[in-house]
Structures are given as structure tokens and as C-alpha cells.
Amino acid sequence: MRTRLLPLLIVLMAAVLLALGFPLGASTAGVEQQRVVVDRIDDAARFASLAQFVTARPAADDRNKTPEEDERRATLRTELARYYSLYGIRAGVFYRDHTTMAAAPAGLSVPHDGEAAQAFSEALAGRRSHDPHQIWPWDDAGRIPVASPVIRDGDVVAVVVTDSPTGQMRARILRSWLLIAAGECAAMLVAVGAAFRLTGWVLRPVRILDTASHDIATGRMNARVAATAGPPELRRLARSFNEMADHVEDVLEQQRAFVADASHQLRNPLSALLLRIELLALELPDGNAEIAAVRTEGRRLARVLDDLLGLALAEHTDADLQLTDVAALAAERVDSWRPLADAKGVRLDYEGPAAVTGWADPIALSSALDAVVDNALKFTPEDRPVTVGVAPDGDRVEITVADRGPGLSEDELDRIGDRFWRSGRHQNVSGSGLGLSITRALLTAGGATIAYAPHEPHGLKVTVTVPRGAP
């Protein structure tokens, strides 16, 4: 869930930051350019104030010039030249007919097209030029033209035009953008950290609930959730989960107690009943078929009661985990069952190393192996092998019991281990259908598992897995 929730939060936060960052970057560029335009308008107004009293044309007769006007023209030219020298900004003052009053650099003329020509036309109409188009950091050839009218006696007699390079302005815009990008990255990192903390705070109770549910599903009925973290709704859910787990544990405990008590209490009447059957058999002829059938059913009922009591005890008893030599224990159980296998004509062999350690309850593991080996010997025909193997597999130890019996179908493999379940093809084989259920309960209590699979070309392969690490 965290892997799905985190990307969603991060994408939303990134979209918000970008939605704020792009307009901020555009606004920063516009403010920087507006500052430059205002500065150029002020410069153009200053040059216009110097030029408004210079009316004589350069080609006019010198007799029409006054010494004062010559001085003003010289001052204007000096100021324009110094301005160009210091700032690299081209500037000129032009009469209405586009002739030059003064310009720097020399030879600068009125542009005939583009924004500069439009600004010149607007200045001739008595208006200052409008804001030029926005210059971006990647516009290497971008320039800012500004025009201002020279007005004398209410008439426009000339126009001041400045044509500014934008290298420094573009550099300042780029630095501003880098600062904005750094701020966005820092904000994104903070947002990601906040998203991790938020999702952790919200999902931690969910993970704890999931772990506790898994523990209860695998038989650890004492698993509970600490309802002290997360949102109030999840804390309330944790308390409800604990109450539900308490009720389920109480019901299962009552069920185990009932099964144990029932199986224990029924043994005495059943023993008395079997004894009376034996006494009754003394009064009947030898070989009576009905008495033999009653004896068989009585012994079967006794086995069922014994298995029920064993199942109740297996589900109720805590495992006594110890560092156990699993290989030695498996070899010992093979030696114990070999006489029975020889009597049935079945080859029972052990394959594996002499010593492999794992953490298990030795008594529970021995009982589980006994049930699995007994089941394999029951269904393996004469002169067929049953192999018990032990092999380490990473942090686990695998014990396999493979037989060459008839095996089970896929549907039967799904049901094997259910209480009282037996394959319809094996109803003539003695058993209560509880042996593998007891085995699973014994192994689960110690953290071990049991799995069933076909053993090609035919037969059943049972794999018991024991952890190698300490619990």
C-alpha cells in the first residue's frame, strides 16, 4: 500500500510546486525586464531633455547656429558617446524625417522594421514606446528597444532611441531561476520527507494489523495490536481487532477443551464397551462375523478418540524450541521404522548429511516425522522405496519423505491435512484422517511448515521445513 500511496502524494506535491514555480519564474523574468525598461526610459528622457533645444540640422548654414546651440549639440553627442562606452547601449536622437541629430556609435540609423521601428513610430505620435516582448535567458539575439519623444513647444521635433543588449539581464533572470529551482528542490525534499512520515504514521497500524492477522492465521493466537499509534480511526480498529482476537481465542480454547474432555471422557465407556464385547464373544461360536466387525469398529473408534486427544493437546501445547540435529533425528526415526518397513517388504532409506542443525521441538518433530513415515509406509506397495532425505536450504532445513504409492490428484492435494479427510480411494486403509492434521499443528507451533507435492512418476512427496535461525 505504501508503494501505491507514496507516488500519488509525491506526484501531487510536485504538481503543486511546479504550478507555483512556473508562474513565479515568469513573474521574476517580467520584473527584471521591467526594471531594465524603466531604466532605459529614464535614460531616454534625460537625452530628450538635452536634445529639445537642438533644432538646427547638421547640414544647415552655420550662420543659423548659435554658440549656445553648438554647445548643446556637443554635450548631447558627448553624453551619448559616454553612455555607449560605459554600458554598450546604442543610442541616438533622430529628427522626424529620420535624419540623425546625434548618435553613438557613429552611423547608427533609425531601424526600418521590428520593435524598434514600431517604438519610433509611437514616439513620433507623442507616446513613449510600449513594453517590448519578454526576453528569456535562451534569447541570445534578444534586445530591448526604447523610444522617447523630444517635445518642444508642444510638438514632437525628434525621437530618442536606445537599443540595449540583454546579456546581463538574461544572466540575472537565469540566476533567479536557479534560486527558484533550488528552492523548489528543497521544498520537494521536505515534501517527500513529510510524505514518508505521513504514510508511515498512517500505514504503521495497518502493517501491525496485517502482521497480527497473519500470526493468528498461522496459529499464534496470542498475537495482539498495540492501539497507540496512527489516526484515531485506525486505533479504534486496532482495539476492535484485539477484542475480536480475544473472542476467537476464547472460542477456540473452549473448542479444544471440549474435544479434549470429550475424547477423555469417552475412553472409559468405550473401554468398558469393548470389554463387554469380548465377554459376549466368549458365549458365541468362534469366527462369528458380527463380533469381528464390532471389534474392528470399536478399535477404530478408540483410535479416533486417541487422535482427537492428541490433536487437542498439539494445538494447545507450546513448542519447546531447541537447537536440534535434524539429520540425526531423521536418521533415528528411519531406523525405528525400518523393522515395520521390512515386514511389509518396503525399502526405507535415509539420504542426506550426517549432521544438520535447526531450531525445532525434538519431540514434536519426531511425532510429525512418525506420522508422515507411517502414512508413506501405509500406501507404498511391496518392493517399492520410501526415501527420507535431509538437506540445508539457506536459512531453512528441508526434510523430505518421498514414496512410490498411488499418489494424490490436484484436488486431493488441496484437501490433504484437513481433519477427518481421507481419499475415497483409500477408505480400506486403516486410519482416522487426523494424523496429518496433528502433524501440521505440531509443526506450526514450532515455526515449521509442511507441504505436499506429487512425486514423479507416481507417489507423494512430503516436505517438512524447519528454520535454522534462532526464533
Image (cartoon, helix red, strand yellow):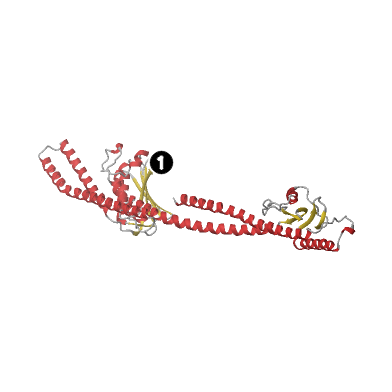
Q: Position of residue 140 (x, y in %)?
A: 71, 53
**Left or right of 245, for residue 200:** right
Write the residue at 24% across / 47% down: 308
Which of the 4 image quarters holds residue 152? bottom right
Residue indicated by mark 1: 456
Q: Quadrant of residue 270?
A: top left
Helix, strand or loop under label 1: loop
Percent x, y for residue 14? 53, 52
Relative image position of residue 470 (x, y in whole percent): 38, 60
Front residue of 292/260: it is: 260
Q: Which residue is found at the position 59% from the left and 52% from the top? A: 23
Task: Please determine whether, in this image, residue 414 is positioned above or below residue 132.
Answer: above
Residue count near mark 1 (Cα–Cα under 10 Å), binned few <14, some 14–19, many ≥20: few
Image x and y of residue 61, in percent: 89, 56
Q: Please state, as top left, top right, bottom left or bottom right, where the C terminus lies in the image.
A: bottom left
Horizontal arrangement in the rendering, residue 298 relative to residue 317 (left or right): left
* Residue at 53% in and 58% down: 187
Residue 449 visible (yes or no): yes
In this figure, what is the number of numbered marks?
1
Judge by depth and name the residue closer to the eye, 317 or 434. 317
Judge whether 296 appears above or below 224 on screen: above
Q: Can residue 88 be seen at all in this image of the molecule?
A: no
